[in-house]
Amino acid sequence: MKFSCSLETSSERIRLVNVISPLIKAGYQLVTQRQEPSENGGNIIHVVAKSQGSKTQEDLIDDLSSIEGCTLFQLEIDGEGSADTIPSAVASAPPVTQDLDQKNALAAIGAQYPDIADIVRHYEASLPHESRAKAMHELGRKVGSGIYKRDYSLGSPLKMPTTINRELVPALKSFSKVKAKNNLVALTKCPFCKLSDSNHSGCHFVVGYIDGFLSSNPAVDRVRVEESSCGAGTTNICEFIIW
Ligand SMILES: [Zn+2]
């Protein structure tokens, strides 16, 4: 299976060699590789490579997401004539979604961000009812925290409530229309509620996201987030209160 991927490293000290050595060790055959500086002070590493033997798509996502100091943000798999060719939409590919544990969900989210509503819904559906709310919150927390660190942690941190308008709202806008006023944030086309009835817990992901995003900001002391109104099955407008 041939694939191309892009990873962003967390610092300029983590370079091409730190990414390709583990890949070579894991048995991948490199086709091309390239490095460029990222806007966030790290490097962007682009790799085209082939897997050998019986590596599955899940193995690949596992291998890529376990490279230290890197975030996988783009992955395209080119089946090259093999019967189980799967297009770039890792998330909608049945072999991955059947067994979507948190690590795989995070890797798929990293690869597809911000187009993640399907992955989040698949992950939610794979969980037993009683643990959904907690697991969705935890997943959201990790994603929100990762996005803050990736996109907003450079420079001096903004305090509350400025960080809500200047950082959180733009971050949320990558997957929904957003309205914000003071400490109220509303996703006016919540993609996590779409297609679901009022029993869903997709918005726990958003609560976790906001929580993780703001908690990663060193200028924010303590934060509590609750969904004050959910539009699942009706308006699709979900409101969150932050204090
Ligand atoms: Zn909702």
Image: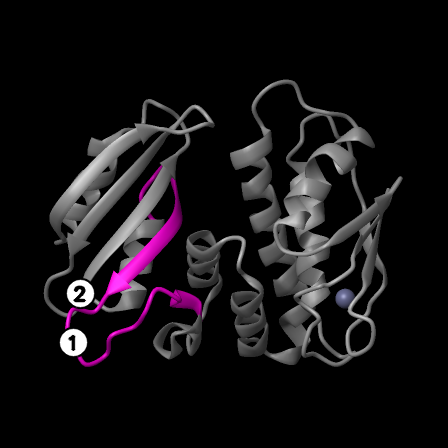
In the image, farthest residue toward the top: 156
Q: Quadrant location of residue 159?
A: top right
For the record, the magenta segment spans: 66-91
Residue at 45% of width from left, 57% of height from top?
112
Q: Name the kind of residue labelled 2 in the image.
A: Met
* Quadrant containing ligand 1: bottom right
Query: Which residue is identified by label 1?
Result: 82
Whether residues under marks 1 and 2 lie with C-beta atoms below 8 angstroms apart, the answer is yes
Left or right: 66 as drawn, with respect to 210: left
List x then y, in percent, for residue 12: 35, 23
Residue at 77% of width from left, 74% of height from top?
232
Q: Name the kind of residue labelled 1 in the image.
A: Ser
In the rendered image, residue 151 lying in the magenta stretch gets the answer no
Residue at 17% of width from left, 65% of height from top?
1
Query: Which residue is identified by label 2?
Result: 1
Colour scheme used in the picture? one colour
